[in-house]
Image (spheres, rainbow, N blue to C red):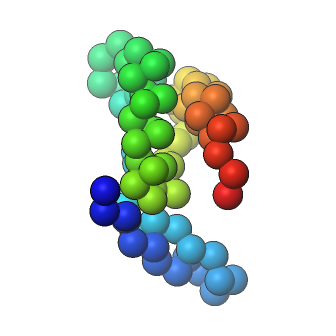
Amino acid sequence: MAKVPKVKLGSQGLQVSAQGLGCMGMSAFYGPPKPEPDMINLIHHAIHAGVTFLDTSDVYGPKTNEILLGKVTSFFSY
């Protein structure tokens, strides 16, 4: 699997993936919420591909996407 390239973020030396994963459709706005196991698999796939920018908002729940990401990212060490 090809890795997503990284880009510099700001002036503090932080890096983030050049491609992000928008999480809005996982829990709101595009029909009913998607099945949690499917979204966890999608996030795992993105992280394994090198995606480190996961775009969420408190508007999508509230906190629904953040809780989902917490369930996924607790399995990874950065």
Q: Is residue 30 left or right of residue 64?
A: left
Q: Position of residue 18 (x, y in %)?
A: 40, 68
Name which residue lies at 59% across and 34% down. 72
Name which residue lies at 39% across and 35% down. 42
Quarter-wise, where is residue 9 in the image?
bottom right
Name which residue lies at 47% across and 18% down. 36
Q: Is residue 66 above or below residue 18?
A: above
Which of the pair 34/31 is nearer the observer?
34
Q: Is residue 18 above or below residue 7?
A: above
Q: Residue furthest front?
A: 1
Name which residue lies at 39% across and 72% down. 5
Q: Residue furthest bottom?
A: 11
* Image quarter in which the N terminus is found: bottom left
Q: Position of residue 74 (x, y in %)?
A: 69, 37
* Image quarter in which the C terminus is found: bottom right
Q: Is residue 36 above or below residue 51?
A: above
